Image (cartoon, rainbow, N blue to C red):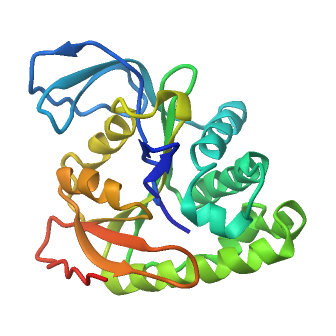
Amino acid sequence: MRLLLRSHTGRRSLGLRPTFGFAAPKVAPATFLVVRPTTRTTAQVGITTGAVILLQGLMRALTDPRELDLAAAVLGRAFANDPGFAYVLGEGDRVPALTWLSRRFIDYTINAHGEVTAIGDPIKGVLLSMDVPARYTLSTLGMIRAGMYGSPFRLGPGAVVRLARFGARLDDVHARAMDRRHRYIFYLGVDPKHQGHGVGKSLLRPKLEGLDTPAYLETLLLLNVKLYRSLGFAVFEESPGPPGPHAWCMVLSSLALEPVARLA
């Protein structure tokens, strides 16, 4: 599974393989505040221009099942045009299947003692992240506990096979990139109505501030590589496929981990 930076109708979307925000007034540069997940706050988040976007609303950890359902719906819309899920699910309206699948990923994250973080009320963006103690391996038992046993009926048998093969390809790179404790940016998406204004970055930056371990993510769009580089990530490896579309696997390291860019 992964995090994707997505593009929807040409807009940048932090949605592994991961989008952003809502319009807000610019204020004078350059203050960054660490925003605690349970704190009601106004988040000041720097963007690549050096300006600061003022985001009014909530940034919080989600635990209530009703809010988790709403978060899944946001992720379902955020990933509707994602190239990875287009490969897995094919043509047609992918939002219902993606909403169901996103709910499973949310439960998987919670079962792995990860965090489900949202911003906005109503929710505008959602981040799933987790600490991985050593080399990453997808937990089959964890996926079963999260309800993935229903995927042949909800997604279709062919989609399940494609998802497994694509996921295994990316998980192989992840395991080679990280053999130590690290933070995995598993899933990040912003509602299409609020993309392009810094919501995704405002979710991700606080998770990276003061991080004492490496971090890892994947993205399926080249335009998002620049975004992640602006946050300190570097390309570890490009994974061209098949199965599935091209992916950029990226690391942010506080240690002596030297990223190796393998360009297609």
Q: In which quarter of the image is residue 167?
A: bottom right
Camera-side residue of 106 and 64: 106
The answer to whether residue 69 is above or below residue 5 is above
Q: Indicate left or right for 205 with 64 as reference.
A: left
Pinpoint residue 90: horizontal percent, then vertical percent: 73, 64
Question: Which quarter shows the C terminus?
Answer: bottom left
Regarding residue 178, the answer to whether it shows in the image is no
What residue sits 43% from the left and 54% below the top?
Answer: 5
Q: In this view, does 53 lie above or below 219?
A: above
Residue 39's x, y, as percent?
39, 24
In front of the other: 26 or 141: 26
Q: In this view, does 239 lie above or below 37?
A: below
Q: Give the camera-side residue of 82 and 125.
A: 82
Residue 75 on image: x %, y %: 60, 44
Quadrant containing the N terminus in the rendered view: bottom right
Q: Residue at x 10, y 16 (%)?
A: 28
Q: Which is nearer the eye, 7 or 233?
A: 7
Look at 63% across and 83% down and name the residue there. Answer: 165
